[in-house]
Amino acid sequence: MTNMTSPNTSNPPNLTWPAPVQTAQEDEGQWHRAFSSTIAAILIIAAMVAVLGNTMVLTVIIRHRGMRTRTNLFLVNLAIADLLVGILLMPFSITTMISDGWIFGSGIMCQFNGWMNSFCLITSIHTLMYIGIHKYFSIVHPLSKAFQLRTIIFLMSMAWIWAGICSTMNVWGLEIEYKPGTSQCGPKYPSNTKAYIIHTVLQLTVMIVPFFTLVFCYTRMFIEIKKHSARLRTNSTVEEEYILATQKKVAVTLFIVLAFFFLMALPYVSYATYTTVNSTKVFPYFLNPVAYMFLYLNSMVNPIIYAFRSPAFREGYKEILCQTPNYVISDGEFSQK
């Protein structure tokens, strides 16, 4: 990593990170103390909630056989990715914000941090895409046998494998470094044809394809649910109404999970796009920490959504927190032993 220290001896002595070309802040790249303290405090709370919440999600699914549905197996992928963010990524950003700069060197720790950032993000995106495809077949083509258990396990594995491939492309193709004014290590800003090609491939496979796939799947799902509802109003049984209501509730829950993910990822996507197309590479000092803060906040959201939307998960959390193992919990309902 090149030395970013300015030879200007007139700088105030307490400025650890002199002005790099990547920042537009007048006080030479450092964050205001109130800003960095606020970001660090938010991330500390988010990390604790993410670790506790996603650990409970995994515990509920592992402990209760009735919770090991095909959809919930995909939720295991999401929970593991979010747990890794809380354990392995947020602490780096918290320390960087508190220390007013990266203190872990430019070697293995920086490379690991940059690799893990993209690894967890891509795993979550592709898992959400596979969940959307799975529910599309469940609702629109209910007689299809496309999603057997082995298919679910294969797609779960592919989410991790593709994330690993893309993250390695980041490390070897775009090169990972710490850029002063950022809260983590990441790929260099694209500056040549090779870097722009790699960045385009990653954006296409990681963002654009999953986004349009999900739009198609959820649009078709809700159209089909609306058709079923109209049909059942004229000729239905109690069992058919229950099945449709359950499918609709699950679809809405998963859509909320998806909506929160894209809402939280939007600042990061905007930041990544802006830094790619901006030729000056001069950015506001708050842009990177805020973008990554929102991205990390998504890791604590899913367990909260499950608690509000699923009685089964709610009872599972209660069992763990209150230490009262008195229920056999299954997806959609629970019954006392």
Image (cartoon, grey):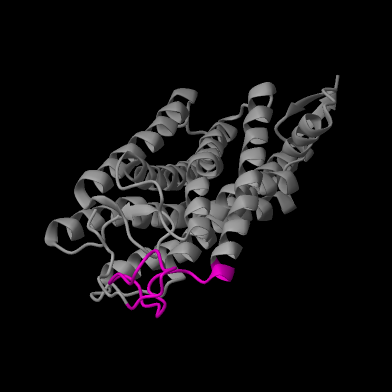
Q: Which residue is pictured at 75% across the width and 32% down the height?
A: 316
In the image, 56 versus 155, the foreground residue is 56
Percent across and percent down for residue 122 are 40, 46
Q: Which residue is pictured at 73% across the width and 44% down the height?
A: 307
Query: Which residues fall within the magenta stretch?
Result: 10-35
**Horizontally, is 147 left or right of 8 in the view?**
right
Q: Which residue is pictured at 39% across the width and 70% down the height?
A: 29
Q: Decide: is 276 above or below 84.
A: below
Percent across and percent down for residue 24 are 36, 77
Q: Which residue is pictured at 59% across the width and 63% down the height?
A: 37
Q: Quadrant of the C terminus?
A: top right
In the image, 232 versus 128, the foreground residue is 128
Residue 328 occupies which quadrant of the picture? Answer: top right
Q: Main secondary structure of the magenta part?
A: loop
Q: Is residue 11 magenta?
A: yes
Q: Is residue 322 magenta?
A: no
Q: Decide: is 194 above or below 48.
A: below
Residue lying furthest top in this view? 337
Residue 260 visible = yes
Percent across and percent down for residue 20 are 30, 69
**Horizontally, is 249 left or right of 323 in the view?**
left
In the image, 141 versus 232, the foreground residue is 141
